[in-house]
Amino acid sequence: IRDCFIRSDDDCIALKGLDFGGEGTDADVDGITVENCALWCDRARIFLLGHESRAKFMRNVRAENLDIIHFAMTPFLLEPGEEMRLEDVTFASIRLEGQGELIRLKPVVNQYMRTRVPGHVRGILFEDIAVEGSKPGEYGILVSGADDAHRAAGVTFRRVTVQGRAIDRAAPGVTVGPHTESVEFHAE
């Protein structure tokens, strides 16, 4: 997806690995790029990865050089389920305008699942993300695993700023929950 302006009521970019049960169907998602776009969502998410997916994996996803000019709900919602492996995902050079929870990254069980089992998260990078909001306040970031078998690992925040201030583990609104490993914050 390149050089687009997308305004939506529901999610702007929702990646779903769907299995329709026919011969030759492949639910896995691999090698998706979103670049040089302006995104505006009136009611839902900018990026939704993991919901309603039947894939074994969703990987090699890159979103780069984006302007998110309006969001109403968490713009980066990464919640894999059904044992799906969400891995090697990069969000880079993104400018956002808005306020509220920014990132929720956690394997989950939700109402859309056939099997009631969380997924896995590994190798997620947020780099050169700049958030400008109209009001001061907390801009939530949650990274958590579901349990010992369904962890969030290898999550890196590099040069992520909110209203010009670098985000680190101690910043207001940042929660690194249980069942995580190698969650890193770098100002440089």
Image (cartoon, helix red, strand yellow):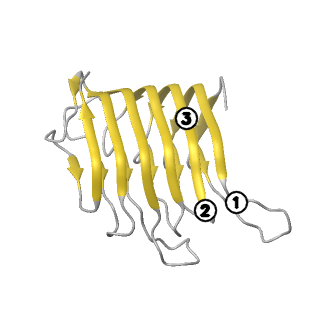
For mark 1, does the 10 Å Cα neighbourhood hold few (<14), some (14 to 19), or many (20 or more) residues?
some
Asked whether disc 1 touches disc 2, contact meaning CB atoms under 8 Å apart, the reply is: yes
Mark 3 and mark 2 lie on one chain; the one further toward the N terminus is: 2
Secondary element at tag 2: loop
Residue 175 versus residue 187 in the image, above or below: below
How many numbered dots are placed on residues in this image?
Answer: 3
Q: Kindly state the secondary structure of the residue where label 1 is placed.
A: loop
Which image quadrant for residue 188? Answer: top left
Give the Cα distance between marks 1 and 2: 7 Å
Q: Which residue does the numbered mark 1 point to in the structure image?
A: 27
Q: Disc 3 versus disc 2: distance between alpha carbons?
A: 19 Å
Residue shown at 40%/29% (left/top)?
A: 96
Q: Quadrant of residue 51?
A: bottom right
- The dot on residue 62 is 3
Name the residue type under label 1. Answer: Ala
Find the distance from the CA under tag 3 to the CA under tag 1. Answer: 19 Å
Q: Which percent across, then down, holds residue 97? A: 38, 29
In the image, residue 98 sits, relative to residue 154, either above or below, namely above
Quick one: 29 or 111, which is closer to the camera? 29
Q: Position of residue 47 (x, y in %)?
A: 51, 44
Residue that numbered label 2 is attached to:
56
User: In the rendered structure, are the residues bearing label 3 and label 1 in contact, judged by CB atoms less than 8 Å apart?
Assistant: no
- Say if residue 50 shows up in the picture: no
